[in-house]
Image (spheres, rainbow, N blue to C red):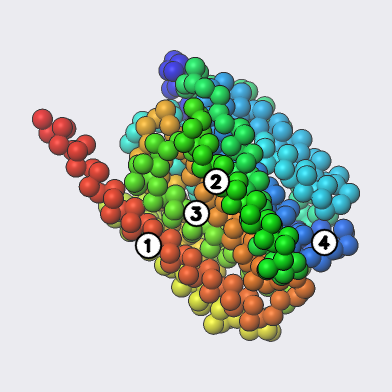
Amino acid sequence: MDTRSQPRLYRPSAVVVLTGAAFLASLDLFIVNVAFDEIGRDFGTASLGRLSWILNAYAVVYAALLVPMGRLTDRYGRKSGFVAGLIVFTAASLACGFAPGVWWLVSARVVQAIGAAAMTPASLGLLLATLPPERRAAGARLFAITGAVAAAFGPAVGGGLVQISWQAAFWINVPLGILLVAATLKVVPDVRHNQDAPRPDLLGGVILAVAIAALVLGIVQGNDWGWSSDRVLGAWVVAAVGAGAFGWLITHHRAPVIDPALLRVPSFAWANVAQLTFNIAFGVGLLSRILWMQEHWDYSALRTGLAVALGPAIVPITSILVTRWLSRVAPGVLIAIGTTLFAVSGVWQALATGPSPAYVADMLGPWILGGIGVGFALPQLMAAATSALPAHQTATGSGVVNMGRQVGLVLGTSIMVGILGDGVPSLARFQHVWIFLAITSFAAGLAALAMEAVRRPAAVPVLVPAED
């Protein structure tokens, strides 16, 4: 590894650029949430299943390619991979705005996801690989907080842009992307690792994307096609075969998408289970509330964006307070507290919500409690997973963590669509969604406690030699 340029990464300008890219990728995801109605009206479709692919296609490809792209940037240079990803993401954002139909838009979103998959692990890898071990967890928390800030600003920004046109929600990425590319070339140094490592398993990434997409297809289309129809069962067969092929590849390829050695680190494995499960609940929580307010309370995109902004805005504040006041509390316990609060918010939402618009009485309390829960859980999940890894595996390991996060969001969105069905869902169906949110969030807390149980004994062999 070339260490001569590492100290330059401590410049605040470089940190701003690297976290800014994470903010941009997350901002785009949350901006699109509030644009569904406008996109559907423009393209003449009200099918939630069809529109959900605007989110799901992005998240599936992003999840499947995160680790292979992380390995490519490890091999050929993180800065070059970061810049290439930004350029692809920015160009695809421009194309999204010119899409003449839903499936053209979905295709542009796939290209957008390829760019995001290149720039995300490269940016986190650049940040973490040059930080000393004692600061790596803080760096991971900072990176995770940017996603929460994007979740706060995304719907509000998206709601304002949609007042102009839904295309503007994508075109906002173009000037931001150009600015980040220029800043990267000027202030961000390169950090290289494993330049002689074998080429990553891109085929495995494609197979994983196909398997996840097939699973999602069966879930999303189950109501329309029939849960026992040949098409739904065929989609699930493709998902099962793809999962089997992917499992074979990760045990036989020289550079698999998921290194089995990483999964043998118990704390890392359990952290990823918690990450996956919690993000199923998180994906349900945001989009379901947006749909409820737009479809039942007849909120505009702007009013919806402003209404949902408060919950995510609580996340970074909570995270900072938790880090300052509860720094001695075990990460697994903090995560379990957060996921439990988020679960309670789902139950509260199901019990409080009525058919008449009443934001303060029905939505505000559960939404703020949910934001506090995310502030406890989400940054700690990222930090707990990546801090256990050696420096040369941070980019790949962070890719696995982010992959679990994105797969969770996809599954959450898909299961929610399956529960709600097409048309305007009833209050009872939304209540079922919020109870599902509570169950999955609580399960994530159990996985976090399991992570803590296996993490503590692992600390003993490290401490003993230090005393000799």
Task: Work out whether residue 181 or residue 414 is closer to the camera in this orientation and state it.
Answer: 414
Tell me whether the residue at label 3 lies in contact with that at label 1, contact meaning CB atoms closer than 8 angstroms.
no
Picture quadrant of residue 237: bottom right
Q: Nearer the viewer, mark 3 or mark 2?
A: 2
Label ID, residue 40: 4
Q: Which residue is mark 1?
A: 446
Distance between the alpha carbons at the discs numbered 4 and 2: 36 Å
Mark found first going from the N terminus, 3 or 4? 4
Cβ atoms at labels 4 and 1 below 8 Å apart:
no
Q: Position of residue 417 (x, y in %)?
A: 67, 66
Q: Nearer the viewer, residue 260 or 405?
A: 260
Residue bearing the label numbered 3: 276
Q: Amino acid at mark 1?
A: Leu
- Disc 4 or disc 1, which is closer to the eye? 1
Q: Which of the marked residues, 2 or 1, is nearer the chain's N terminus?
A: 2
Q: CA distance from mark 4 to mark 1?
A: 39 Å
Q: Is residue 58 left or right of residue 266?
A: right
- CA neighbours of label 2 inside 10 A, class few (<14), some (14 to 19), many (20+): some
Q: Distance of mark 3 from mark 4, alpha carbons?
A: 29 Å
- On residue 78, the disc is none
Gap between marks 2 and 1, in whole Å?
27 Å
Q: Label 3's element?
A: helix
Query: What is the CA distance from the residue labelled 3 to the residue labelled 2?
Result: 19 Å
Image point 72% across, 66% down: which residue? 229
Q: Which residue is mark 2?
A: 244
